[in-house]
């Protein structure tokens, strides 16, 4: 009875579904192409998108400390991060966000920087592994593994491995900065077996996963379980005995050092990254501070 | 014979016990959430907690104020309602009154599929498509109230559509026949007679939609930008109550941890209030 | 055909006279279109971008930092679903039996149970996650584990199963029960031999829908199941479901992680598609193919 009308409706439906699809495709297309198509048209009067991390991230802690974003007076400590900053929840989310936003600035571990973003020189020094190692690039922090009191046999052996020449090779291959005076590692003659639990910094995930795999190859009897829940939580877990070793991507605080014995196993620079279309190539610590406290809101005011 | 009655009686008691489990679960959830939240709120101060706009767990002294997040949750929920309710309602009218019989099962299936898609998929889609789209075509960096509202608007569609449709269908045929006999067009009868008659069902669907939007976590945290500010426009970043919990929970310890549970408790109270509103609505309908 | 053309012309004449009606007609069509278009767009987007990354290595290979395979997540998802359903399904089916077959209408306890299930249905998954991590994780000391996660989502799906089971039990004609009693069967026997088998497709469809809910859940699981990227060895180990794996992949791992997320998304959406089709097929069976309510 209503055949014709319903046929017409069906037809409209079909057409617009197709239109919806193709419309969608073109959106994604322009989204991907947008960056390169408009390259060079960087408008420095546009607002800066400041990208930071959630409050208890180790990278954030180290960055805030190094850039002077934490204002201390007596007992009180106040974080001056610009309140409108976008909060990314992991090391890799920052470059992903910077990649698509021309006016964005963020910071991430040097190991996580890829070709899709531009790492700025800070105070005239390029963010490279050599510069971190020779100490000229100041924005860096250590990767620390810490145990409560005397480490167990397996834990001690694992620490021995990751600070050895073999372990440091892995560190270097993952793009992090090695420590000095590493020694050769040999697996203990009496094969180890048991479970080792680690928890802590998400920034150390890439390198620790690799180290874990290599270590287990040498010591097949050992089962290592790692929870990447952030430096602060990892340190607390180790203090509470929830896990045996803590992974931290910032220096331990004084009160934490009282409970845990830290060992540095790698160093990592924090790269300040911007979009590829950004005309800036370097910033001073002072300028970075101005951006991250929200004092400078556009790129031409930096 | 006697053995049988014992079995019969016993099974009845057993079924009753199983039924009481859900009451127990609700009480347990309330107890454990509030037992952790209330001491934290006492320590922070109820007023400071609810009206403070600074959330700084790493400062000394720490600051825990969730005012911006309460407002943020309300903003994105309102946005979702603005987007989802008109489309959902019109869609329900279409399904109930205008849909050709042959494509009805297909559409019905599609709507239930829309409800079944995991929130993580919606969030990922929003992050990859909607956020860059807003960034390219409007002001701001894309992570915004608008992005979250669009994603949530799509997510509440199936709730609005299916519940409204059911209540539209429940309106007696005589209403429509009367309207048509008086010379109204199909559209006039649908919008002026049937829709008003199905009002309570429609309101129920909106309340449930609000509940879904305000409690959604994963999809929102991926597109909202999560800055702790009072957004001054729909292109500004926003942090909701749910996002605050999921962002910081795994890192938190001590008072910070309890403050996050307290954030959850505030969310919980919102949901309980919505449920009560819903209860009032349905009981009114019955009466 | 002539009749149809005539009808179409009539309709056109009406619309010419009442443009508002035409506008409303177009609007409701547009709304439905938008709904369907967004569904197709979301699913299409995930599939178009994901299928190319879906290599056998990534789905079935062993997980390592070079190959963020989802094999362990698939296993964890299956284990979690089974454990959660073992807990939730009997409990909620018994509850539905009580509510439909035993309880007297208007009973205070029944009202309370209904209020409780409605409340459970409304609680956001993140609150379940908080509760699960406090109660199962800390109080009972199970930490981040499959058991903690399964118990949490089991409570979450209770209302889903209870409500649909109730509906399908109620749709069993009373004549079946009367027939059974007439033959001298006891109430318990009637319930298990007559009522439940007839309601079975509906109950199955409810259970399957709850599987969909568990598979898609993230917020309630990251603080209960945890996110360790490892094949679980026991129920007390932490691991990831597919949805959690997808979330962690979008957060971590840069572009490679994004590709993993797309591929995981394809698997997730496919599971949900199958589950929905299966559930509606079963639901159709129970209502005798008459689902359009016309």
Image (spheres, rainbow, N blue to C red):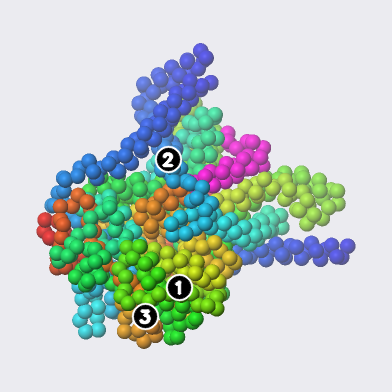
Give the structural element (helix, strand or loop) at label 1: strand
Q: Mark 3 packing: few (<14 Cα in 10 Å), some, or many (20+)?
A: many
Whether marks 2 and 1 lie on the same chain: no
Question: A298 or A149, which is in the foreground?
Answer: A149
Q: Earlier in the sequence, mark 3 or mark 1?
A: 1
Residue under label 3, please give it: A262
Instruction: Measure the C-alpha gap from mark 2 to mark 1.
Output: 38 Å
| Relative image position of residue C280 (x, y in whole percent) | 59, 42
Mark 3–mark 2 distance (CA, rounded to whole Å):
48 Å
Q: Is the residue A110 above or below the residue C59 in the image? A: below
Residue under label 2: C48
> In the image, is residue A8 above or below residue B1?
above
Tell me which segment is drawn in magenta: C266-294
Q: Nearer the viewer, mark 2 or mark 1?
A: 1
Residue B6 position within the rendered picture, expressed as x and y whole percent measured from the top left:
81, 66
Q: Dot 2, how many residues are within 10 Å of its Cα: few (below 14), some (14-19), or many (20+)?
A: few
Residue C284 belongs to the span the image colors magenta: yes
């Amino acid at each position: 009875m209503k055949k014709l009308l319903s046929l017409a409706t069906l037809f409209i439906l079909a057409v617009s579904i197709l239109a919806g699809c193709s419309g969608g495709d073109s959106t994604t297309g322009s989204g991907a192409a947008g960056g390169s198509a408009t390259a060079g048209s960087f408008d420095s009067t546009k607002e800066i998108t400041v990208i930071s991390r959630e409050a208890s991230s180790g990278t954030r802690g180290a960055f805030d400390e190094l850039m002077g974003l934490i204002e201390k007076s007596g007992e009180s400590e106040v974080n001056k991060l610009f309140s409108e900053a976008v909060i990314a929840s992991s090391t890799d989310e920052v470059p992903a966000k910077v990649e698509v936003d021309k006016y964005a600035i963020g910071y991430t571990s040097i190991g996580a920087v890829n070709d899709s973003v531009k790492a700025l020189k800070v105070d005239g020094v390029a963010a490279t592994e050599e510069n971190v190692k020779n100490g000229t690039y100041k924005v860096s922090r250590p990767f620390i593994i810490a145990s409560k009191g005397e480490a167990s046999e397996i834990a001690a052996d694992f620490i021995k491995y990751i600070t050895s020449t073999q372990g440091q090779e892995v560190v270097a291959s993952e793009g992090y900065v090695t420590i000095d005076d590493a020694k050769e590692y040999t697996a203990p003659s009496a094969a180890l077996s048991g479970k080792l639990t680690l928890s802590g910094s998400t920034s150390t995930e890439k390198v620790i996963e690799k180290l874990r795999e290599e270590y287990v190859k040498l010591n097949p009897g050992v089962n290592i379980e790692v929870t990447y829940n952030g430096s602060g939580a990892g340190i607390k877990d180790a203090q509470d005995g929830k896990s045996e070793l803590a992974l931290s991507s910032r220096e331990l605080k004084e009160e934490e050092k009282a409970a845990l014995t830290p060992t540095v196993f790698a160093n990592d620079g924090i790269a300040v990254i911007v979009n590829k279309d950004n005309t800036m190539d370097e910033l001073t610590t002072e300028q970075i501070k101005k951006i991250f406290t929200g004092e400078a809101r556009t790129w031409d005011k930096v | 014979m006697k053995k049988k009655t014992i079995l019969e009686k016993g099974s009845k008691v057993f079924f009753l016990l199983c039924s009481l489990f859900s009451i127990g679960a609700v009480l347990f959830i309330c107890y454990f959430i509030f037992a952790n939240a209330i001491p934290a709120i006492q320590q922070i101060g109820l007023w400071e907690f609810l009206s403070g706009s600074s959330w700084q767990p790493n400062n000394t002294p720490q600051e825990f104020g969730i005012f911006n997040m309460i407002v943020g949750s309300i903003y994105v929920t309102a946005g979702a309602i603005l987007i989802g309710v008109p489309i959902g309602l019109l869609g329900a009218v279409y399904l109930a009154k205008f849909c050709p019989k042959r494509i009805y099962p297909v559409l019905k299936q599609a709507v239930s599929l829309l409800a079944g898609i995991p929130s993580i998929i919606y969030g990922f889609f929003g992050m990859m498509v909607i956020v860059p789209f807003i960034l390219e075509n409007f002001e701001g960096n894309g992570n915004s109230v608008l992005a979250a509202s669009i994603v949530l608007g799509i997510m509440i569609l199936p709730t609005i559509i299916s519940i409204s449709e059911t209540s539209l269908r429940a309106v007696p045929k005589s209403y429509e026949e009367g309207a048509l006999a008086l010379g109204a067009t199909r559209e006039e009868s649908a919008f002026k007679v049937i829709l008003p008659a199905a009002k309570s069902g429609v309101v129920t669907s909106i309340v449930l939609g609000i509940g879904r939007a305000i409690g959604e976590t994963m999809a929102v945290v991926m597109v909202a930008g999560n800055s702790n500010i009072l957004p001054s426009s729909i292109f500004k970043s926003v942090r909701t109550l749910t996002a605050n919990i999921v962002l910081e929970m795994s890192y938190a310890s001590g008072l910070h941890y309890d403050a996050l549970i307290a954030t959850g408790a505030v969310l919980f109270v919102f949901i309980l209030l919505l449920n009560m509103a819903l209860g009032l609505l349905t009981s009114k309908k019955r009466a | 055909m002539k009749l149809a053309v005539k009808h179409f012309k009539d309709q056109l004449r009406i619309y010419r006279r009442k443009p508002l009606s035409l506008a409303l007609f177009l609007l409701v069509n547009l709304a439905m279109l938008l709904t369907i278009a967004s569904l197709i767009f979301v699913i299409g987007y995930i599939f178009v971008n994901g299928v190319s990354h879906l290599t056998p290595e990534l789905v079935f290979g062993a997980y390592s930092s070079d190959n963020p395979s989802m094999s362990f997540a698939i296993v964890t998802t299956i284990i979690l679903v089974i454990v959660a359903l073992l807990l939730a399904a009997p409990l909620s089916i018994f509850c539905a039996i009580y509510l439909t077959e035993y309880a007297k209408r208007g009973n205070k306890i029944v009202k309370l149970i209904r209020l409780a299930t409605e409340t459970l249905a409304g609680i956001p998954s993140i609150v379940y996650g908080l509760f699960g991590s406090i109660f199962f994780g800390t109080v009972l000391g199970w930490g981040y584990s499959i058991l903690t996660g399964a118990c949490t989502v089991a409570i979450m799906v209770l209302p889903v199963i209870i409500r649909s089971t109730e509906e399908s039990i109620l749709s069993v004609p009373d004549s079946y029960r009367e027939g059974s009693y007439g033959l001298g069967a006891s109430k318990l026997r009637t319930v298990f031999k007559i009522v439940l088998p007839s309601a079975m497709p509906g109950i199955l469809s409810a259970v399957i829908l709850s599987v969909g809910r568990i598979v898609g859940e993230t917020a309630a699981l990251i603080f209960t199941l945890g996110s360790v990227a490892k094949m679980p060895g026991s129920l007390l180990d932490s691991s990831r479901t597919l949805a959690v794996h997808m979330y962690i992949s979008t957060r971590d791992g840069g572009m490679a992680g994004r590709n993993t997320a797309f591929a995981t998304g394809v698997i997730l959406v496919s599971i949900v598609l199958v589950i929905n089709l299966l559930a509606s097929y079963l639901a159709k069976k129970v209502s005798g193919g008459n689902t359009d309510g016309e």
